[in-house]
Image: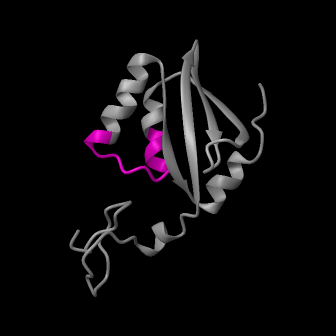
Amino acid sequence: MAGQICAVCNSRLPPPHVPGERRCAKCETVKHRVYLSFMHREAWHCSFLESDAKTVLPRKLALEDPKKLFEMAERGGRKMNLEAQQAIQHGIEIGRNGFWLELTEEQYQKLRIASRRR
């Protein structure tokens, strides 16, 4: 809250240190808010929704390891404090949940392309 570290990645910010949450130059490029919904059915199936929480993005994922959900959250700009970790863990325990991601343009464009089936 002192304005000395980035609110997203916790890197040090250059002066002047203005009180309140701030982002570094790298994290300022976050432009797209996307909801990741996951459910367990033989694997962890993930789907993505636009910020309106209605429009489905074409990319779908199936993960074998639930730990990958934590990695996706972190890479997607989710602040992984204790509350966020517990929320994801609770979702894993009950078999379904979701969380918001703040994606860069490049990450967002990858979600706009349907995944190829193997």
Q: Is residue 99 above or below residue 22?
A: above
* Quadrant position of the N terminus in the picture: bottom left
Q: Is residue 32 magenta?
A: no
Q: Residue furthest top?
A: 42
- Quarter assignment of residue 40: top right
Query: In front: 98, or 28?
Result: 98
| Residue 96 picture location, percent across and down | 49, 23
- Quarter assignment of residue 15: bottom left
| Residue 64 picture location, percent across and down | 54, 21
Q: Is residue 20 above or below residue 108?
A: below
Instruction: Report the residue at 39% width, 32% height from top.
Output: 88
Instruction: Report the residue at 49% width, 71% height from top.
Output: 28
Q: Is residue 3 above or below residue 56?
A: below
Query: In front: 32, or 9?
Result: 32
Instruction: Report the residue at 45% width, 40% height from top.
Output: 71
Q: Is residue 60 left or right of residue 91?
A: right
Residues drawn in magenta: 71-83
Q: Is residue 73 left or right of residue 116?
A: left
Q: Is residue 75 magenta?
A: yes
Q: Is residue 42 above or below residue 102?
A: above
